[in-house]
């Protein structure tokens, strides 16, 4: 049996096993509740993202930005601004004469000045302008680094911002590109990532099946399998540079290792679900395009607003993908398994062409009438 057909057979068995497990552990009512809950959570996340973006990114006229305008006037004497979010119960921000305890951010025009440690600033006698903000100036349930970065862009302009708690350094000279450039970057990153993930997933599964068949044959013939295992390990090691390259590629584009790793994991999960459980005709026609549209929207947001609420957008994208997968799995995949429109003989219902072939195989030949 060819490797491709045997791989498709294994994936179909996994799909049948998953369908039976879902039907045994969750009834129709519970599956519907999970589907609706994912949809409601996705809509709520979208509304939250729109509200946060409108308040802190599109028009960030907030107390932090107003206080930074006063601090920028003193930067001719002090090249560094220290922004502190205290625990005081108010939303006011003002230039202070002394430092206050709290969550600190350092802003400077030069990268080297922003990276200086506390001891280095004291040794070099770097003058500092302190901006103290109350605890309500930046809500605690949002990404404070995104709020401060947009406030600095509005109040102080371009430069470098360092978050003292996380150690992240933000290049505020990176501006949002035009729509065509954003769409091109999003399409390039998404195409490259999905193609490499699809290739790696298919190749590793095919090689594992080939290795299993060869190992079974070697053991049955009582031969040594050390050379076979060594060869398989060397073949599998060839995919390590691909994975490392993908991670470095995403780290370079997103400038956030956690975000890049999470997006790569999300693409892996989408590709795996499509390979295993997208088999009904409606799923094959619509679900891959819907999932790709969600991922493209996420990439466009991340590239258009590099200092936006990235993790809120990522959470909304994950919820939308979960809702789409639950919707098609509950309403089409399980139905196709019950009705037998997908089976071991026809593991993927790809459209009318397959129906025509299967019908011609099942229907008896017509009799020819002769005069």
Image: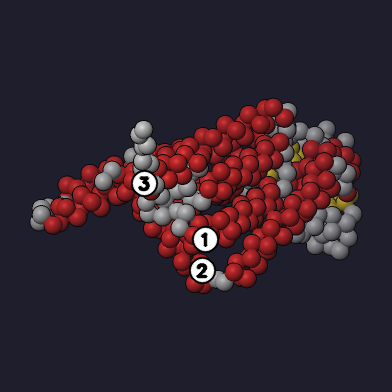
Report whether residue 105 is seen: no
In the image as oriented, which residue stretches furthest toward the front? 371
Q: Earlier in the sequence, mark 3 or mark 1?
A: 1
Nearest to the observer: residue 125 or residue 176:
176
Please state if 182 lies on the left or on the right of 90 as rendered.
Answer: left
The answer to whether mark 2 and mark 1 are in CB contact below 8 A is: yes
Q: Residues within 10 Å of mark 1 (few under 14, many from 20)?
A: many
For mark 2, what is the residue? 23
Report the Cα–Cα distance between label 2 and label 1: 8 Å
The answer to whether mark 3 and mark 1 are in CB contact below 8 A is: no
Q: Say which element carries label 1.
A: helix
Report the Cα–Cα distance between label 2 and label 3: 36 Å
For mark 1, what is the residue? 334
Q: Residues within 10 Å of mark 3 (few under 14, many from 20)?
A: few
> What is the x, y in percent for residue 147?
77, 48
Q: Earlier in the sequence, mark 2 or mark 3?
A: 2
The residue at 80%/57% (across/down) is 139
> What is the x, y in percent for residue 70?
89, 41
Q: Earlier in the sequence, mark 2 or mark 1?
A: 2
> What is the x, y in percent for residue 144?
74, 52
């Amino acid at each position: 049996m060819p490797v491709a057909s045997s791989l498709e057979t294994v994936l179909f068995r996994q799909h049948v096993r998953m369908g039976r497990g879902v039907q045994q552990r969750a009834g129709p009512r519970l599956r519907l509740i999970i589907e609706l809950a994912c949809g409601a959570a996705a809509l709520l996340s979208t509304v939250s993202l729109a509200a946060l973006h409108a308040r802190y990114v599109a028009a960030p006229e907030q107390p932090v930005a107003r206080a930074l305008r006063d601090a920028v006037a003193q930067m001719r004497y002090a090249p560094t601004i220290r922004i502190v979010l205290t625990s005081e119960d108010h939303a006011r921000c003002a230039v202070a004469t002394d430092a206050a305890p709290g969550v600190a951010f350092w802003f400077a025009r030069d990268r080297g000045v922003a990276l200086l440690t506390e001891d280095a600033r004291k040794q070099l006698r770097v003058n500092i302008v302190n901006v103290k903000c109350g605890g309500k100036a930046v809500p605690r349930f949002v990404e404070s680094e995104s709020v401060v970065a947009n406030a600095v862009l509005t109040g102080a302009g371009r430069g470098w911002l360092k978050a003292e708690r996380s150690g992240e350094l933000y290049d505020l000279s990176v501006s949002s590109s035009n729509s065509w450039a954003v769409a091109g970057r999003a399409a390039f990153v998404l195409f490259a990532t999905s193609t490499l993930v699809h290739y790696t997933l298919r190749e590793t599964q095919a090689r594992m099946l080939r290795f299993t068949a060869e190992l079974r044959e070697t053991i049955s013939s009582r031969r040594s399998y050390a050379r076979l295992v060594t060869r398989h390990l060397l073949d599998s090691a060839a995919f390590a540079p691909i994975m490392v390259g993908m991670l470095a590629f995403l780290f370079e584009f997103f400038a956030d290792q956690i975000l890049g790793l999470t997006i790569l994991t999300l693409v892996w999960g989408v590709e795996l679900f499509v390979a295993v459980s997208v088999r009904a005709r409606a799923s094959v026609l619509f679900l891959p395009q819907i999932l790709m549209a969600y991922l493209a929207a996420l990439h466009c947001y991340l590239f258009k607003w590099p200092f936006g609420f990235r993790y809120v957008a990522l959470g909304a994208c994950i919820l939308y993908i979960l809702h789409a997968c639950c919707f098609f799995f509950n309403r089409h995949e399980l139905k196709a398994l019950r009705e037998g429109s997908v089976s071991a003989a026809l593991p993927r219902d790809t459209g009318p062409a397959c129906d025509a072939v299967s019908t011609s195989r099942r229907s008896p030949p017509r009799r020819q009438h002769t005069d």
